[in-house]
Image (tube, rainbow, N blue to C red):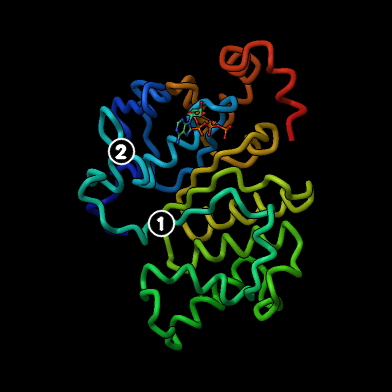
Amino acid sequence: MEPMTQGVPVVKLTDVSFQYEDKLVLDGVEFSLERGEFVGIVGPNGSGKSTLMKLILGLLTPNKGKVELFGQPLSKFREWNRIGYVAQQVAHGAGGFPATVQEVVASGLVGKVGLFRRLNAQHHASVRAAVERVGLAEKLNQRIGSLSGGQLQRVFIARALVAEPELLILDEPTVGVDQESIEQFYGLLRSLKEENGLTMMIVSHDVGVMSQWVTKVACVQKKIHFHGTAHEFEHNQEKILQSMYGDSVRLLSHHH
Ligand SMILES: Nc1ncnc2c1ncn2[C@@H]1O[C@H](COP(=O)(O)OP(=O)(O)OP(=O)(O)O)[C@@H](O)[C@H]1O
């Protein structure tokens, strides 16, 4: 870690607003993520969670305000290999794609290696290391179609890890994954944070499980309604959720 970058937030949003055509989705969002934090993003359906992620990933540009990554304004930021992204698709049909674990994980190196260049021995070693890191060493040459939802999820984590990112962003990664695998999955994320020093951001509807594993929670609904430690969140959960979800809060606890 360079001493110069210590203390600079990994992600910082200042007064960020975003609208799709005439629909204002985020309004004056203030948010920062410090190195080594693991933040869970929660909020009702359509509250702007994915939009927030897309702004951070540079896929959308704010109408107002400033997004900074590793201390650099988004417009100047080019070091996308410092950010790994695991999208939502996973458990739904991705397993039908005729590729092996090794091939899928190697595709995470495209940004570094280029689309048509061959992987060298070092690249192959990185792929094997990432697959081992997620506990799937013996599945290296298996087709992803033969894996369970939980295993497939770990393949996508390995694909994000292979380029050695510092920030890992996960959008609803546990949809369609069974309860036992979800626990293993969060256990893996925690060890990535503690052993590899990764900074992480996760969007999940499963507030109950997620809040047990993250260090911070941010509640989004147009604005950031709450941003604090997981401990503070657990203690004030009912009040916070009630203010965001209103009467649908009871439905939320049954949402899977
Ligand atoms: N491309 C788009 N064009 C127009 N409106 C959009 C677009 N994408 C999202 N929206 C709207 O913006 C709002 C916020 O969407 P967003 O996907 O950020 O919410 P979310 O919190 O991630 O929702 P969910 O929990 O349902 O995934 C929603 O009302 C959605 O319908």
Image height check: is 256 above or below 98? above
Q: Quadrant of the C terminus?
A: top right
Tell me where residue 145 appears, x and y as whole percent: 72, 68
Classify residue 174 as left or right of residue 123.
right
Image height check: is 245 above or below 181? above
Bin the neighbour count of mark 2 within 10 Å (Cα to Cα): few under 14, some 14-19, many 20 and up.
Answer: some
Tell me where residue 156 appears, x and y as whole percent: 58, 61
Q: Residue at x 56, y 78 (%)?
A: 128
Q: Is mark 2 within 8 Å of ligand 1?
A: no
Identity of the amino acid at label 1? Answer: Glu
Classify residue 81 as left or right of residue 121.
left
Identity of the amino acid at label 2? Answer: Thr
Tell me where residue 54 appears, x and y as whole percent: 42, 42
Q: Nearer the viewer, residue 177 or 144?
A: 144
Q: Nearer the viewer, residue 229 or 167?
A: 167
Q: Residue at x 43, y 52 (%)?
A: 167
Tell me where residue 153 appears, x and y as whole percent: 65, 58
Image height check: is 108 above or below 207? below
Label 2 or label 1, whichever lies nearer to me, is: 2
Q: Is mark 1 within 8 Å of ligand 1?
A: no
Give the CA separation, mark 2 to mark 1. 22 Å
Residue denoted by label 2 = 61
Q: Quadrant for residue 140, please give it.
A: bottom right
Q: Residue at x 42, y 85 (%)?
A: 118
Q: Residue at x 20, y 50 (%)?
A: 76
Say whether disc 2 or disc 1 marks the residue closer to the N-terminus: 2
Residue denoted by label 1 = 166
Q: Quadrant of the N terminus?
A: bottom left
Say which element carries label 2. Answer: loop
